[in-house]
Image (cartoon, rainbow, N blue to C red):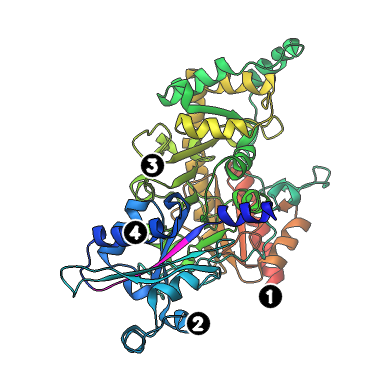
Amino acid sequence: MADETARAAAAPLVVGVGASKGVPATEVLALIGAALADAGLDPRAVVELATVRGKAHEPGLVGAATALGVPLVGYAAGELAAVEVPHGSGVVLAAVGTPSVAEAAALAGGGQLLVPKRKSSPADRAAMATCAIVRRPRLRPIAEGGDGPPTRSEEAMPIPTTEAPHDLRHHGDAEVRDDGGALIDLAVNVRTDTPPAWLRERIADSLTGLAAYPDGRSASAAVAARHGLPAERVLLTAGAAEAFVLLARGLTFRHPIVVHPQFTGPEAALRDAGHEVRRVLLRAEDGFRLDPAAVPEDADLVVVGNPTNPTSVLHPADTLAQLARPGRTLVVDEAFMDAVPGEREALAGRTDLPGLVVLRSLTKTWGLAGLRIGYVLAEPETLAALQRAQPLWPVSTPALVAAGACMEPRALAEAAEAAVRVAADRAHLLAGLAEFEEVRAVEPAEGPFVLIRIDGATQVRERLRTLGFAARRGDTFPGLGADWLRLAVRDRPTTNRFLQALDQALTLTHP
């Protein structure tokens, strides 16, 4: 019984609020503070303000939520009208469609009403606020359509969803696994002919030191120097995949958002850690470009790729920077950024954006998928939380040696040259694809891969396999369907052979 009482006392508080036009934030805050104090409630337990959607942009309510450091959630009037309230008003019902904005918004997600509707007593009776307080056993997940105040028209705004119908654990290597090397791999985005001989030699030399426990200080310092950061802003990980797991388990947040289509590892890690995940789905008709307004205001964790896998879209750094704000963790997956000439639009190395976390991988450019090495760049406090979720010695000595070697000037110059070659090879691939009426490629593409749409892509992919080529299916990426394929960029001779095979596959599929 004592445990149940303790759990109830620890449950979050949701404050329903209403406001007439022009009510100041100070009055809203004073009303909420008095209500909490009179009921003996801890203000730190407040996790959300809730109101009717038509009031969700009222400056006084927005200002109060900002001052409290909690999201302001807006519900549709019709949804609140269906909530039974103990102190409803016919006047309010006629005005806004619900008998009590404060009580209905507080109770919309369930819970126990602790403080019934209270009104402020302003000198100006035209500027009044109301509030009600509910103890909610668990936070209400935001379902399809979202509860947050609309920032654009519903027609233009991608819809957040908590659904997870896709195979989030499918990876491109599944397309070539167990094929005995018979297929030319266009499904995995690792650069061919890697790791280079000099890197293999450095890794091999490290094997003489396996008796000692790994020491990551030198590699961390090398990564920090490469990005112009202090070493305490670097955390080495067993690839970017581990970093996503650490983020899901090591940080505290309530409203995670993943921008799709993108690599599915982040969402899989979040769901495995028990989080309710909402998706913002970017649209093909918009070129899969990100509009910051599409991300709900209450999101306290936002994950986005740049350049994005599988769309190959490179979002402007200024666009991504608009998503950063106090109280929110912004995770930018830059696993393919070193394949972009000049790494333009990169956020790695930035320290001016609150809550910024940048992930990098050495897997793709250097062919180290089997070694597992990557790193996280973030504020020291964030990295400390992630490190607490790591096991001891998470990165092996060979991986640490590889990380340090890939930060050297010689290696950076080689990577820069490779990025230029990839851009030229990608242009050649896109030019060839443009010759097919049945194929539509997402452009401009900036990663070492391209995304294409073909009617009957599943059949085309199977035909390509019989002709010796493996392509990555697209239907496992949220926001894409069975008509999408991702193609890794290869050298011109390989691309020419692929285009010939594609011509045959299309002829057989669309006679």
Measured as percent of width and height from the top left, residue 75 is found at: 43, 73
Dominant SS type (magenta)? strand
> Disc 3 vs disc 1: which is toward the camera?
3
Measured as percent of width and height from the top left, residue 140 is found at: 55, 65
Residue under the image location 53 percent in, 35 percent down: 360
Q: CA distance from mark 1 to mark 4?
A: 75 Å
Residue 64's disc is none
Residue count near mark 3 (Cα–Cα under 10 Å), binned few <14, some 14–19, many ≥20: some
Q: Quick one: SS at disc 4?
A: helix
- Which stretch did the figure color magenta? 14-20
Which circle's residue, 1 or 4, is located before the other in the chain? 4
- Tell me which corner region of the image, top left, top right, bottom left or bottom right, holds residue 141: bottom right
Q: CA distance from mark 2 to mark 4?
A: 25 Å
Mark 1 — residue?
511
Mark 4 — residue?
34
Residue under the image location 55 percent in, 70 percent down: 110
Q: In the rendered image of this protein, does residue 73 appear above or below residue 176?
A: below
Q: Are marks 3 and 2 in contact (CB under 8 Å)?
A: no
Mark 3 — residue?
345
Query: Which residue type carries mark 3?
Result: Glu
Which circle's residue, 3 or 1, is located before the other in the chain? 3
Q: Quick one: SS at disc 1?
A: loop
Which circle's residue, 2 or 4, is located before the other in the chain? 4
